[in-house]
Image (spheres, grey):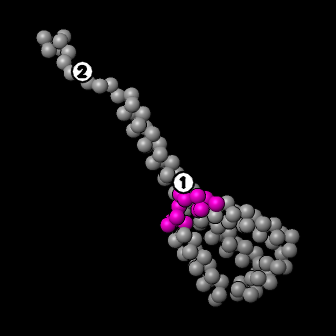
Amino acid sequence: MLIQFLLIIAVVLLLVLFLRHHGTTKTAAGVKIGFVLFMVLGAVAVIRPQWVSMIAEVVGVGRGTDLMLYGLIVAFGFATINTYLRFKELELRYARLARAIAIRSAETPAATDPEKSAA
């Protein structure tokens, strides 16, 4: 089926592009553009469901709602990976911040303390 091929290609391309360029400004802009595009396509699907059904027939899916579900599954996977990578990045930032605070607030050891050496 054509839809299976298209969905697998879409998932692989999204993963490769996103994982390779995660954290860059281009990727952040691409995610925002993709989100807006997905929302616009969702609105069009609500306003003109027959268009989605026609596209579904072309790619080999029985109904337009099934096509929307497949697209939603791909989008959900992408959003999940994006969220995971963001949390991972934030965790690393917090660890670096905690280390920097610990180093700045650390007390320097006394070279020689006369009271301790007499005891």
Seen in the picture, residue 74 relative to 7 is either above or below; the reply is above
Q: Is residue 24 magenta?
A: yes
| Quarter of the rendering occupied by the C terminus | top left
Residue at 26%, 24% in the rendered image: 109
Seen in the picture, residue 3 relative to 103 is either above or below; the reply is below
Between 54 and 106, the one lying in front of the other is 106
- Tell me where residue 69 appears, x and y as whole percent: 70, 72
Seen in the picture, residue 117 relative to 57 is either above or below; the reply is above
- Marks 2/1: CA–CA distance: 42 Å
Identify the element where label 2 is drawn: loop
Q: Is residue 51 visible?
A: yes
**Would you identify the image quadrant in which residue 108 lies?**
top left
Residue at 18%, 10% in the rendered image: 115
Most frequent secondary structure within the magenta stretch: helix
Q: Check disc 2 and give the amino acid type.
A: Ala
Q: Give the labeled residue for mark 2.
A: 110
Residue at 42%, 33% in the rendered image: 101
Residue furthest front in the image:
25
* Mark 2 vs 1: CB contact within 8 A: no
Residue at 68%, 72% in the rendered image: 71
- Tell me where residue 13 appears, x and y as whole percent: 56, 74
Q: Is residue 108 left or right of residue 86?
A: left
**Would you identify the image quadrant in which residue 67 lies?**
bottom right
Mark 1 residue crowding within 10 angstroms, few (<14) / some (14–19) / many (20+): some
Q: Which residues are magenta?
A: 18-29
- Tell me where residue 32 appears, x and y as whole percent: 67, 60
Count the marks.
Answer: 2
Identify the element where label 1 is drawn: helix
Residue 86 image label: 1
Q: Check disc 1 and give the amino acid type.
A: Arg
Q: Is residue 115 left or right of residue 80?
A: left
Residue 34 image label: none
